[in-house]
């Protein structure tokens, strides 16, 4: 049941990302960045749900994608904010690889 709800959540994120395209709204950099990030979060969620040992690698990849796509596609204050968020996610993933996080956080990476 839990995996079915996870698949449904991933599908909702993908539909939510594609909704502006399906409604024939103009494709701006904001729409493209949002769609990329939502689709990759949905795919990452599915991978983590079905392959728990891949959590750290997927988290690392998501941080890079969020930081780079946000920085490249969005305008000034938002691009810096997403770059910082992506950098924080990458740092957390690296610390999880090195097992330098507190045990209550580290349990999410090693199940």
Image (cartoon, rainbow, N blue to C red):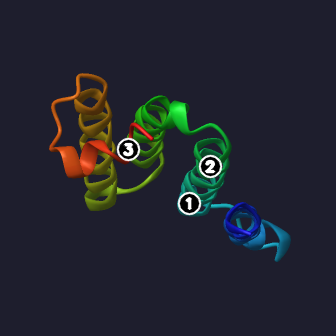
Residue at 58% in and 44% down: 48
Q: Nearer the viewer, mark 2 or mark 1?
A: 2
Q: Secondary structure at mark 1?
A: helix
Residue 38 is left or right of residue 21, and the answer is: left
Give the x, y percent position of residue 98: 23, 22
- Residue closest to the eye, 25 or 83: 83
- Residue closest to the eye, 72 or 35: 35
Residue on which disc 1 sits: 34
Residue 49 is left or right of residue 56, and the answer is: right
Tell me: residue 57, above or below residue 87. above
Residue on which disc 2 sits: 49
Residue 64 is left or right of residue 4, and the answer is: left
Q: Nearer the viewer, mark 2 or mark 3?
A: 2
Q: Nearer the viewer, mark 1 or mark 3?
A: 1
Residue at 77% in and 66% down: 4
Question: Which numbered disc, 2 or 1, marks the residue that appears first in the sequence?
Answer: 1
Residue at 26% in and 60% down: 77
Pointer 3: residues within 10 angstroms few (<14), some, or many (20+)?
many
Spatial CA distance of label 1 from label 3 is: 12 Å
Give the x, y percent position of residue 7: 74, 61
Tell me: residue 73, above or below residue 99. below
Residue at 76% in and 68% down: 15
Pointer 1: residues within 10 angstroms few (<14), some, or many (20+)?
some
């Amino acid at each position: 049941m839990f995996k079915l709800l996870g698949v449904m959540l991933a599908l909702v994120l993908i539909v939510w990302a594609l909704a502006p395209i399906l409604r024939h709204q103009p494709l701006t950099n904001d729409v493209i960045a949002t769609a990329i990030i939502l689709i990759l979060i949905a795919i990452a969620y599915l991978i983590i749900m079905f392959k728990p040992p891949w959590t750290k690698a997927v988290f690392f990849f998501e941080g890079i994608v969020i930081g780079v796509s946000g920085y490249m596609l969005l305008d000034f204050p938002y691009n810096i904010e997403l770059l910082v968020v992506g950098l924080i996610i990458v740092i957390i993933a690296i610390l999880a690889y090195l097992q330098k996080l507190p045990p209550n956080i580290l349990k999410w990476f090693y199940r």
